[in-house]
Amino acid sequence: MQAVEFDQFGDPSVLKLRAVTDPVAGATEVLVQVRAAALNPKDVLLRKGKFGWLSGKRFPMGVGFDFAGVVLAGAMAPGTRVWGMLGGFRGRCVAEQLVARPSELAVMPDRLDFNHAAALPLVGLTALQALRDRAEIREGQRLLINGASGGLGLVAIQIGKLLGAHVTTLSSAANRPLCKRMGADVVLDYRVDEPLSRPSAFDVIFDVFGNRSLAAARTCLKRGGVYVTTVPSRQILSDQISSAWSRRCRAKLIIVKPKPADLEQLAWWVNGGKLKPVLDRILTMADVADGQRFLETKRARGKVVVQIGS
């Protein structure tokens, strides 16, 4: 089969489309024919070696953590259309086949094609677990999303609204219509507005870009407020420990985990017309290096998806 791999850390030129051995599923695993996979900033950071302490340095490494496809064999019925997200820090979804654990996938929504289905698992699970579990957001609370026009931010807007929050977004003026279309109540231009200077304006800050900090957010967070980020750093780990028992405000890092029940919740929202993935572009397996270069510009308006097969 064909897969995209890399043999060393580096720039996008290290990514290679090559023939590899077909994977074999164990008795408790699922063999999936991949029809589409998404590219994420996590893939870029891993390719650069930023998470080498988590991924290890055993090459070759694959690319991609979320996917949609059809079961070929294993612990689920052949022919079942599934979507999912692989756990850990070694991707392998940009390939014609993959092996997953049952805990990493679920039946995909009937309402979506494979490309749109592949766009949602990682960002949907991240937004849901960040807002519901880490921030414990409640009906009527005020949520600020920093970096709202990318794949994760656009889904976070929708899930924030589904959880009952009043949603303010921070992005470029050009992305205002898109954020409003996804349900944002207030859209701010990061070049003009500085919401972090507004005293006690928000209950929760979801920092998708990871370019803010708890120290910068203290002024605008209400008492008992929560700052959540997706980007691991020494600073957020220190802030998370030091603020754990604070009554003023707390910092939390979201490390997303594959959970079938959460995938089923996302599918229920999708099938009900309440949650919609947004695609920026659809690529082929030969274009993955270009796709990662585009992600590095941080100009994506939605998800970058790799279509695999016809």
Image: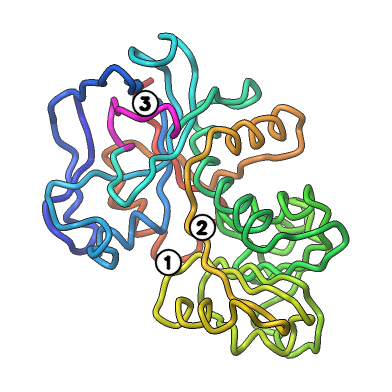
Q: Position of residue 102 (x, y in %)?
A: 42, 27
Q: Is residue 194 left or right of residue 73?
A: right
Mark 2 and mark 1 in contact? Answer it, CB < 8 Å.
yes
Residue 116 on the magenta segment: no
- Neighbours of disc 1 within 10 Å: few (<14), some (14-19), many (20+): few
Residue sitting at x 19%, y 39%: 17
Residue sitting at x 59%, y 81%: 243
Distance from disc 2 to disc 3, alpha carbons, whole Å, reads 23 Å
- Neighbours of disc 2 within 10 Å: few (<14), some (14-19), many (20+): some
* Residue furthest out toward the top: 78
Residue 96 on the magenta segment: yes
Q: Nearer the viewer, mark 3 or mark 1?
A: 3
Report which residue position mark 1 lands on.
Answer: 297
Q: Position of residue 142 (x, y in %)?
A: 81, 68
Q: Position of residue 179 (x, y in %)?
A: 72, 58
* Residue furthest out toward the right: 140
Is 71 rendered above or below residue 133? above
Q: Amino acid at mark 1?
A: Thr
Report which residue position mark 2 lands on.
Answer: 300
Is 245 rendered above or below residue 257? below
What stretch of residues is rendered in magenta?
Answer: 93-104
Can residue 193 be seen at all in this image of the molecule? no
Q: Quadrant of residue 272?
A: top right
Residue sitting at x 71%, y 50%: 159
The numbered dot on residue 34 is: 3
User: Is disc 3 placed on a helix, strand or loop?
Assistant: strand
Q: Earlier in the sequence, mark 2 or mark 3?
A: 3
